[in-house]
Amino acid sequence: MRNERDIAPASPASRQGVGARVPRKEDDRLMRGRGQFVGDIRLAGLQDVAFVRSPLAHARIKGIHVPERYRDVVFTADDLVGIAPIRAVTSLAGFKVSDQPILATGKVRQVGELIAMCVAPSRAEAEDIAAAVTLDLEELPAVYDMRKAMEPGAPLVHEHWGDNVFLESFFETDIESAFDAPIKVTREISTARQCMSPLEGRGVVASFDHRLDQLTLYSGSQMPHIVRNGLSDCLGMDQGQIRIVSPDVGGGFGHKGILLPEEVCLSWLTMQRGFPVRWIEDRREHLTAAANCREHFYKITVYADRDGTLRGIDCEALVDSGAYSSYPFSACLEAAQVVSILPGPYKMPAYRCRTFSVATNKCPILPYRGVARTGVCFALELMLDLVAVEAGIEPGDVRLRNLPGPEQMPFDNITKKHFDSGDYPEAMRRALKRIDIDSIRARQRKGEDDGRLIGVGLSIYCEQAAHGTSVYSGWGIPMVPGHEQATARLTPDGGLELRIGVHSHGQGMETTMAQVANELLGVDVGKIRVVHGDTAMTPYSTGTWGSRSMVMAGGAVATACQELAERAKKIGAKLLQVDEASVMLVDGEIRGPNGSVTLKEIAHTWYRRPQDLPGDVDPSGLETTSGYKPKRDTGTFSYAAHAVTLAIDPDLGDVEILDYVIVEDGGTLVNPMIVDGQIYGGLAQGIGTALYEEMPFDHAGQPLNTTLADYLLPGPTEVPEPWLDHMETPSPYTKFGVKGIGEGGAIAPPAAIGNAINDALRGLGAEMLHSPMTPKRIVTAILAARDVERPAA
Amino acid sequence: MKPAPFNYERPRDIASALSVMTGAEGTVKIIAGGQSLGPMLNLRLVAPDTILDITAIAELKRADVANGELTLGACVTHADIEDGRVPDVTGGAMQRVAADIAYRAVRNRGTIGGSLSHADPSADWVSSLTALGASLSLRSVRGIRRVAMKDFILGALESVIAPDELLEAVHVPARAASARWGYVKSCRKTGEFAHAIGAVLIDPEAGKARIVIGAVEAAPIVIDDTDALFGGTIDGAFASRFDARVADRLLSDAGIADATDRHIHVAVLRKAVAEAA
């Protein structure tokens, strides 16, 4: 619909470099159903694995009974001799270490935990075997609620700790100076546990090649090199004996950044049995046994002056981290991040925050698109609207009053987050203008003929991306990113091959990396192949997470292409018989004062006709691996202002989104069309968080929404087409000024929608502080407010 | 998520189907469109010894009108009704209900008889056909019997169908020209199971109504004293006299303790009544 970009003049067809809306190269195969995902891999002799999983959240294993006829095809922890558990520690002071067993030993700590592995010629037969295995479990009281988990006498997930806290984090600056502020608002705010739900779940195919003395693990992974690190540790094998191949990946969102016990299991199994084995996660496994995320609780107080100027924030937050510390991000990244990112881009003189990563008998919490930011944004932005109500001013004005201006950039906030560039107030002003706040207020005063209530909501988020060594060495988790490498090779026919260690799980990097190379070398995007997703063929990388790939791998591709350009210029100058200083690379050819030679001709000469080159030619050749790191590695900050208008049916609690505006600043955009796609997808997930997605647990720690009939995901009819506007403030620290943008769309919607719902309900005295904001919760809040207004006689 | 092993039978006529039902060893489960049974099999919530596929039985796809009554075979799909491939005697009411069942992919395969046999209280046909005054033919080797929709559902996933019985056909009476129809359901998203259904057939000229509150996690609530719901009498002004307190009390009496649930059910019923007006 009303997307200005669609009606703007298209870039000239010839332009394919940075900033061009080049159609995604990978879509040709993906849209024709020719993609190859883990589930498409067929190997001779392949057998399927099904797991016996814990039916209980917390229990002692007294016995695992395998029918005699299945003794050879069922494996338990006792069989995994010499296999180490998954261990993800951090260097943060006070962190309590726990092991995640590959197959359960002694105790199970979550529903769905792996207990035994069953292998058969088909998945159905493997499930038959799994169904025949019986368990003797002594049920223990489950830790099903993170707040109860903190109470004295609570059952313990890991007995040797003495409590249920993985880690406590704390930060304070001058909080007492805020206590005399005239406005003080306190609320308890929370976000539900969710499941990430990519279209493709996890999947593993493992085989062993005796000629290469090498295990090959096909796994839909965002981070193949990190999987190799973890697998090498667990299996006790040399890294050279392990090859990880991540084929086409149908969405990751963080779930595919985790080392799975299933990956360790199948690696061991194929080496034991000699035939290839496969496990494909089904949707029930996805919903009940893995991929959990988002569950936060905040008790937050915001202090402000009468005009809405922030005086300080005081917060205590809990993150339900689940039973285990996942590799490589650990159980603490989420809660520890809350402390440092809660203030967002806002200016404030005082801040205190204490967070707890709490262990419970649930799946480990995993870093989902936006990681801690979606919860933080929800908590803070809801509070800013309440400050606006107290101050009697527009919510937009509270934000404009407290955001740093462009003249303050780069801006260090109170937790020393370094905001590299941007004009946050301008994004907010554009969003307010486009959503047309004044006419919505007029409409609200008039009322609706159908009795619905109109609300408007705003939120601003910031997304720290591609943060590197200086940030992650502080967390001290098993994975600290350093310099990023890329390999560029000019092929004998003048094509270009790029090899990168990051991996696309929907980002379109086969296109965008080619655009970066095209920008520097002028090689047609159609002639550029991006090789990724294979540890045997790509430079080491921590992989694709934290919206880092374009900044880091894009920077490395640019560096490698620049190096290649220099080499081509040297050869070209020799062929043109001119001084190297007199040539330039333009549109894929080396131009000298009196003539030119194309890269294709240079490549042909170098590889096929070396006899045409003089003897003193530079011997480096037309292939290079080069490294890159931004000038400053504290991360780029992209951001956006979201504004939403919606209507609520107060009888049914139904919410209809009427208008959604996103004014986004992702720095220089390599391919604005792909960025639009990232925002659409993120918005859908953000709407899921806001209105639909929830994984509740009962008091026994049983997950309740175990199919997609219960776990609701937004579909096409639930996701509006937003109006998008891009500001493009380059980052001063990165190649081309790019910033990471992959997660932002999923961060702001719950806050904007929550604020709009509260705006609509304000006249009724109802308030929503928990996501998802379901019809039932909305009606319950309305009825409760009525009861307060008119107490029962 | 793969089903446990089962035998599979696909007979060509009803007599053969009935003999499978009585003759097979162990449990038999009938499959038609499989839109509910399929997932249940894959989740191993049911593990019958035999699956009896009735979709090859031509008689179960019949659709005819006689004496003003529409008869639809059990294997007529929601899409058949939505697309108007079968006759209609309800003034478009059934077509509208069909068009809003789940998603088109489900409607392509899902059948009216399968949906009713599954007896999910939140299913659209359970409430709408009750309000339309439909009845069902249940066939077994013992013979055939006819059951009114209002007596058919006993509870969640529970109906009067005996283990040896097959739901053969649905009979829908013609809707009177003066009868007004309203059907509203509350879903959290398009295609999702309903959390509240209001189905009303109100004839102000006859002064009569059939009012159904559905999706209550039990058999639908069929309101007997419809006059009370409209302040004593049913006439042309029925919508303005809708008495929410009566509906709320009925829901309380039916054991729905949660005030929010009752509020939503009453609101949905009010909307259905308004639609009929």
Image (cartoon, rainbow, N blue to C red):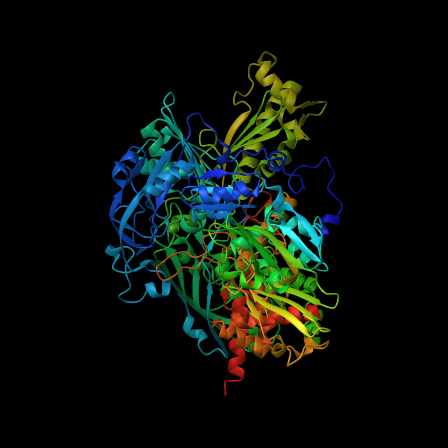
Q: Quadrant of residue A746?
A: bottom right
Q: State whether residue A6 is above or below residue A753.
A: above
Q: Quadrant of residue B235?
A: bottom right
Position of residue A640 in the picture relative to residue A226 (left or right)? right
- Residue drawn 51% across the image and 46% down it: B30
Quadrant where the N terminus of chain B sits is top left
A603 or A693: nearer the eye? Answer: A693
Is residue B36 among what the camera can see? yes
Q: State whether residue A299 is above or below residue B41.
A: below
Q: State whether residue A526 is above or below residue B240.
A: above
x, y (%) of residue A770? 49, 66
x, y (%) of residue B258? 48, 72
- Residue drawn 71% across the image and 67% down it: B179
Is residue A392 among what the camera can see? no
A648 or A359: nearer the eye? Answer: A648
x, y (%) of residue A53? 35, 46
